[in-house]
Amino acid sequence: MTYDLVITNGTCVTASDIAALDIAIQNGKIALLAPSGSLAGASAVQVIDAEGGYITPGGIDCHVHLQEPAMFGGKGRSADNYESGTRSAIAGGNTTIIAFAPLQKDEISPLAAVHATHALARGNCYCDYSFHLLMGNASATALQELPRLKHEEGISSVKIYMTYKALQLRDNEILSILLTARAHEILTMIHAENGDVLDWLTDQLELAQKISPKYHSNSRPPILEAEATNRAIALSSLVANTPILLVHVSDPQAALRIREAQTQGQPVFAETCPQYLFLTRDDLDRPGFEGAKYICSPPPRRKEDQGAIWRGLQNGTFSVLSSDHCPFSFDDEEKGKKSCITREHPEGHFRHVPNGLPGVETRLPLVVSASKLRLTEFVAVASTNPAKLYGLYPRKGALLPGVSDADLTIWYPEGKFGGDLTLKNDMLHHDADYTPYEGRKLGNWPRYTVLRGKVVWDRDNGGVVGEKGYGKFVKRGSAVDVWDKVDEAGFDLEEL
């Protein structure tokens, strides 16, 4: 038999095991795992000698914003479309992303929102992709279409907001979404910050003329996240323990509340991001307008908080490590971070700074280079757990012969990377004009990214070698090992 691709001399790492294995790939699938060296003489169209480097399932970044309309009252427009964003993703070792199909408050149909987002992505992606529904309203029509979203469109997750006037849902609306989501095994993602208190604090800071970038942190103190996290958990508990996933958690107290709920058996899951592991609120206090480069929500916290977030990744409080890639160019005065600078406000106004950071390409290298997670833990939070929670497993996030897509990230072996790499924006493949991690030292970078058996990133021989349009939309099912543990009795008013 002639295989399409054989990878020899590598060390395979999954969420549970590390073993020296060769990999044979045929028709886009993992065909065979064999003892190291045993496939060295196999007939293959292409052979990669991994030289002892680690081979992991391809990265799955399940929190990526691309080409969305302005929804937050500012002038900002994403620096990345589906072409540039997915190009950047494969260069950073990702084989699948999940972006957002936005349903705004004044829009009626989730299905229409999804179809419009398909039109943006179709034929433009370098990696495989799916969508979450970003749900800005809980109208009767929106709720009625959720079953079709799941069963016809293959979209098994929605995201809701407890902040931002353009998207914020009240508690009764959140409950209605949770009830419908529960009935159809749709995972509800929640951005947990207290929007009413946030708006009040922003008004108070503005009255005091405290509007430079550093005050973004003051408008969003940790207690806003901790309170909203607690409220989200309480609401999910009320609706018969409906599964929820708290996104981009930054605050140790919020993480503690999540851990308590998990310990009590509630199906509460959580995600964190590299900005809460590597950046701090001091970055927002850089001279002049430089701090605007680091404005995201929730904001980076204090240096001493980073340890608690790392521990949450190590102990399972956080199932998922995503980028929350939400890129705006810094120097763009019309659509970027500097669009809020005026003659009256030469250092900008934090309320109007486009809110988000680029990060889809740097997520995996940053965390691998930090060496604070065991390799199996890294694979779990960067690939396998996202695949399970978002209904992609075992097609994605695994190395199972005959079952898993041949989606792989191949890293440099120890000593072969060529020393520390200084991260610079001009080496990245997004369309943003900066990275918040400029100047950081990295100890590794993906050597190859393989998507369905095809090498799409070869760092030493051409960089991006995949083609736009090779990435395909992937329909998703229910979360794995989540819904079978949820009480089948459901929501019962008599039991309240």
Image (cartoon, helix red, strand yellow):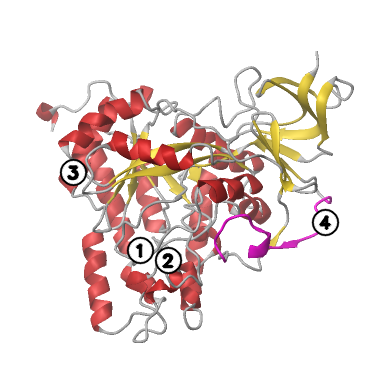
Residue type, numbered disc 2: Lys
Closer to the chain start, of discs 1 and 4, is: 1
- Element under label 2? loop
Looking at the rendered image, the disc whose residue lies closer to the viewer, 1 or 4, is: 4
Task: Using the image, determine if residue 333 lies above or below residue 253.
Answer: below
Closer to the chain start, of discs 3 and 4, is: 3
Point out the residue furthest to the left here.
Answer: 494
Residue type, numbered disc 1: Pro
Task: Using the image, determine if residue 271 lies above or below residue 397.
Answer: below
Looking at the rendered image, the disc whose residue lies closer to the viewer, 1 or 2, is: 2
- Element under label 4? loop
Cα distance, mark 3 to mark 4?
54 Å
Cα distance, mark 3 to mark 2?
32 Å
Residue hosting label 4: 418
Residue at 30% x, 36% y is 112
Give the residues in magenta.
415-433
Res 361 visible:
yes
Q: How many other residues sit within 10 Å of disc 3, few (<14), some (14-19) or many (≥20)?
A: some
Residue closest to the eye, 414 or 288 = 288
Residue hosting label 1: 222
Circles 2 and 4 in contact, beta carbons < 8 Å: no
Residue type, numbered disc 4: Gly
Residue 214 falls in which quadrant of the image?
A: bottom left
Residue closest to the eye, 405 or 128 = 128
Residue closest to the eye, 229 or 466 = 466
Closer to the chain start, of discs 1 and 3, is: 3
Residue hosting label 3: 173
Residue hosting label 2: 335
